[in-house]
Image: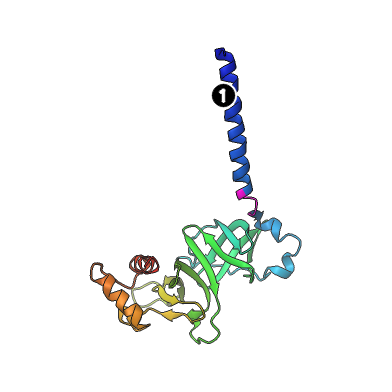
Amino acid sequence: MNLRSLIIITMAIFWSVTVKSQSRIDASNAHLIEYQLSDYYNDYVTTKIGTKTVMSYKNIEGDPYLYKDFTKGTIKFEEGKNIVGKLRYNMYSDEIEFVYWNNVLILVYEDSFNGIKLGDYNIVQLSCPNVNKQNNSGYFIALANGNYDLFCKKSVRFLEQEEPKLYKESKPGRFVKNPSLYYLKQPEKELYEISSIGKLKNFSTELASMVDEYSAENKLRVNEKSLTDFFNWLNAK
């Protein structure tokens, strides 16, 4: 066999393997259907999307958004469909805003949604009708998943404009971030607020034992990184 024939045969084998590999990749992704958000809602936007005007925050210091600018986000479905579009989370109104053509509308969270990926955050909506606290419903950030789920509630409050005082000018209205709140969740159970490490241990005897085991070699605090590290360790046990 001459060199030219060998090269042709080699290229044919390589092409065959490449095509088969690509076919397997395409087949593995065939279940995932991705829509543009504006296209997905185009036919029934008036029934599926709130049409109220998004609040204007002119002349207010700061902003109430998780990300100030609209960020590419993905709305996930349980059946393997995704909607992509530009979203932002308003922590003051506890709403997801999105760009629909030249308008800004409020997303209506449907039962078929399986969470929203926005930047570095995974956002879900939780409903807790048996809990009276305002912060125990609405949008939460999922920090860890497993037998013990960890959620974080981020919010801001609005401070009214302050009237001028002697030798002091007036202060405009402004948004101020509230401390993040953290919650533990198990299937078929309500959200359980983690206000302290002692409160975390009070959840159950098993969890108290795991906290003590982890704390023997790690400092455990009520903040995002520390609790996320602990819950990832806990769910891997």
Judged from the image, the secondary structure of the residue bearing numbered disc 1 is: helix
Horizontally, residue 11 falls left or right of residue 190, namely: right
Q: Residue at x 59, y 57 (%)?
A: 86
Q: Tell me if mark 1 has few (under 14), some (14-19) or many (20+) residues whose alpha carbon lies within 10 angstroms of its own.
A: few
Please tell me whether residue 116 belongs to the stretch shown in magenta: no
Which residue has dot 1 on it? 10
Residue 11 image point, x, y percent: 58, 24
User: Amino acid under label 1?
Assistant: Thr
**Span shown in magenta:** 28-32
Residue 102 image point, x, y percent: 67, 57
Vertical relation: 102 (above or below) 130? above
Residue 224 image point, x, y percent: 37, 67
Please tell me whether residue 29 belongs to the stretch shown in magenta: yes
Report the residue that reaches farthest toward the left. 216
In the rendered image, the quadrant that contains the N terminus is top right
Report the residue that reaches farthest toward the top. 2
Q: Is residue 233 at all visible to an observer of this figure?
A: yes
- Indicate the colouring scheme: rainbow
Horizontally, residue 213 falls left or right of residue 123, namely: left
Q: Is residue 58 at all visible to an observer of this figure?
A: no
Residue 207 image point, x, y percent: 35, 78
The answer to which quarter of the image holds residue 78 is bottom right
Of 52 and 200, which appears nearest the observer? Answer: 200
Report the residue that reaches farthest toward the front. 1
- The rendered magenta stretch, by its main secondary structure, is classed as loop
Q: Residue at x 60, y 44 (%)?
A: 24
In the rendered image, the quadrant that contains the C terminus is bottom left
Q: Residue at x 49, y 65 (%)?
A: 65
Q: Residue at x 40, y 76 (%)?
A: 164
Horizontally, residue 1 falls left or right of residue 182, namely: right
Horizontally, residue 86 falls left or right of residue 147, namely: right
